[in-house]
Image: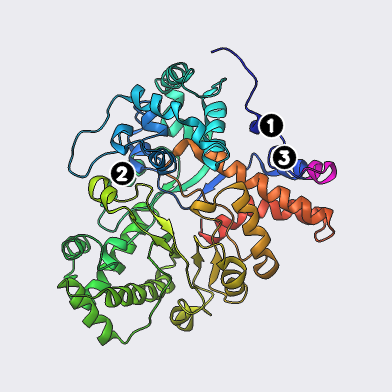
């Protein structure tokens, strides 16, 4: 390919302060952490990639079709998801020609200007694949051919990229209904890459999840108990959690509820709600109460089995009924909502919040909760930690705002470092690099304004980059 100048935002000092002195310090701090291993304790990469170690099919299947950050932006400008190869629930026709999908992507690449996706994509193109020209309609075929040629080579297969990216450990996320066959295959292969699972029980905790009663039947069969009784249902969770630890190396659970509501109901009331859920007779309020109670039950189980608990509330899932009906879940239409934590978490915190055996990591899509609710809660309850700026805020600006709004109350050590929370495998190094740069810039600013000693800044940078994630997720 013809050599041209590297993209401007791949400048080695990108995201550092503008003033020369703190910029120099940010660069020096960054140099001390930029090559540390990647710890990716929460994400959604497909474990089959690492189990089978097959070449990625084509550039479109790697960068476009699986990444809701990419196709949601294109959808917002009228591009049909079927034309991007996004599968349909009914098995109907979608575009299968990778080059055609890539051309649509390239023709619309200008839509990503100024977005985090643009930074991640360009850094992946340049640093992972050695692309040397900007992607646009004119360069689409050249870039496609270049990446496609790379993907044919063994050094671009999933395991080789895992090692090249410097990933020490990566967590995928599976339903309790998953048999973890891919994780078993990885373990049996002799490959030394550490790929672990996380226990995501939404399908068997949320009465409004499609097929809830059928899910419970399968859940019980996998766990070897009658999960249609309240006691059996709780035993099924204990059994599957133990299975996820033993077979998939799980160290955490993950809960994607609509709100942060928790309840601590008498067992008789919880059992009655469960019976109504199985019969499909729960009202919306009763379903929410059941979900809330199950968060407390999950926290109590974590006291016994040591699994770290993550709560991801505040998303209006699958906002477009039309897209949900046609393409299913997780297709870019999950929209942030206002989220209460102070009142919502009180029942759970009354039950277990002062117990240091529990680590409960809170995420939010509502930035207004950072300084008002989340930082004060994490700054006092031993069980609580703050997850990093998540999803719509996992941008340079969002990461900076997170540090500015939480550090003064929660400090650094009630946070858990960074996680990339992505299905887009090749964006992982870029996402972690952005986080490291933002944190180093923030630390340099604290030093420059007399709020942190320089030697402390280096130590905190190492903690934010590496140690805190390993500690919080018990890795």
Using the numbered discs, state the Cα–Cα distance from disc 3 to disc 1 in whole angstroms.
14 Å
Report the disc number at residue 182: 2
Task: Label 3: state its secondary structure.
Answer: helix
**Side (left or right) of 182 relative to 42:** left
Read off the residue under disc 1. Answer: 11
22 drawn magenta: yes
Report the disc number at residue 445: none
Using the numbered discs, state the Cα–Cα distance from disc 2 to disc 3 in whole angstroms.
36 Å
Q: Residue at x 26, y 45 (%)?
A: 327
Asked whether residue 337 is in view, the answer is yes
Read off the residue under disc 3. Answer: 31
Q: Residue at x 27, y 46 (%)?
A: 181
**Side (left or right) of 309 relative to 266:** right
Task: Label 2: state its secondary structure.
Answer: helix
Compare residues 6 and 468 and report the one nearer the observer. Answer: 6
**Side (left or right) of 304 relative to 19:** left
Looking at the rendered image, the disc whose residue lies closer to the viewer, 1 or 2, is 1
């Amino acid at each position: 390919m013809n050599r041209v100048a590297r993209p401007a935002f791949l400048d080695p000092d990108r995201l550092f302060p503008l003033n020369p002195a703190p910029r120099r310090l940010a660069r020096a701090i960054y140099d001390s952490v930029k090559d540390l291993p990647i710890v990716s304790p929460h994400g959604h990469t497909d474990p089959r990639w690492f189990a089978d170690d097959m070449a990625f099919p084509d550039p479109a299947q790697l960068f476009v079709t699986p990444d809701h950050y990419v196709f949601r932006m294109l959808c917002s400008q009228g591009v049909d998801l079927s034309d991007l190869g996004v599968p349909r629930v009914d098995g109907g026709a979608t575009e299968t020609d990778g080059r055609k999908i890539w051309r649509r992507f390239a023709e619309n690449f200008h839509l990503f200007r100024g977005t985090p996706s643009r930074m991640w994509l360009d850094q992946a193109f340049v640093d992972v694949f050695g692309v040397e020209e900007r992607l646009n309609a004119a360069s689409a075929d050249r870039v496609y051919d270049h990446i496609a040629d790379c993907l044919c080579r063994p050094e671009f297969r999933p395991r080789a990229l895992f090692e090249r990216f410097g990933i020490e450990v990566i967590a995928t996320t599976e339903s309790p209904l998953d048999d973890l066959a891919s994780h078993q295959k990885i373990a049996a292969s002799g490959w030394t890459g550490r790929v672990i699972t996380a226990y995501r029980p939404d399908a068997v905790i949320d009465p409004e999840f499609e097929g809830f009663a059928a899910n419970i039947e399968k859940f019980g069969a996998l766990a070897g108990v009658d999960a249609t009784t309240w006691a059996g249902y709780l035993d099924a969770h204990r059994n599957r959690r133990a299975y996820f630890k033993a077979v998939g190396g799980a160290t955490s659970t993950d809960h994607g509820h609509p709100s942060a509501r928790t309840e601590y109901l008498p067992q008789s009331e919880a059992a009655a709600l469960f019976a109504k859920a199985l019969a499909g007779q729960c009202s919306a309020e009763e379903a929410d109460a059941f979900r809330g109670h199950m968060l407390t039950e999950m926290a109590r189980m974590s006291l016994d089995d040591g699994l770290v608990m993550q709560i991801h509330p505040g998303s209006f899932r699958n906002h477009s009924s039309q897209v949900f009906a046609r393409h299913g879940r997780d297709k870019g239409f999950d929209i942030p909502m206002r989220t209460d934590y102070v009142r919502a978490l009180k029942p759970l915190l009354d039950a277990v919040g002062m117990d240091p055996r529990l680590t409960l990591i809170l995420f939010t899509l509502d930035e207004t909760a950072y300084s008002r609710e989340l930082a004060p809660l994490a700054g006092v309850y031993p069980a609580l930690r703050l997850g990093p700026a998540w999803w719509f805020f996992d941008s340079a600006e969002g990461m900076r705002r997170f540090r500015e709004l939480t550090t003064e109350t929660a400090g650094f050590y009630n946070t858990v470092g960074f996680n990339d929370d992505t299905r887009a495998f090749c964006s992982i190094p870029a996402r972690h690099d952005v986080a490291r740069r933002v944190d180093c810039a923030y630390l340099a600013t604290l030093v420059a304004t007399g709020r942190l000693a320089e030697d402390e800044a280096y130590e905190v940078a190492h903690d934010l980059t590496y140690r805190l994630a390993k500690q919080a997720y018990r890795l």
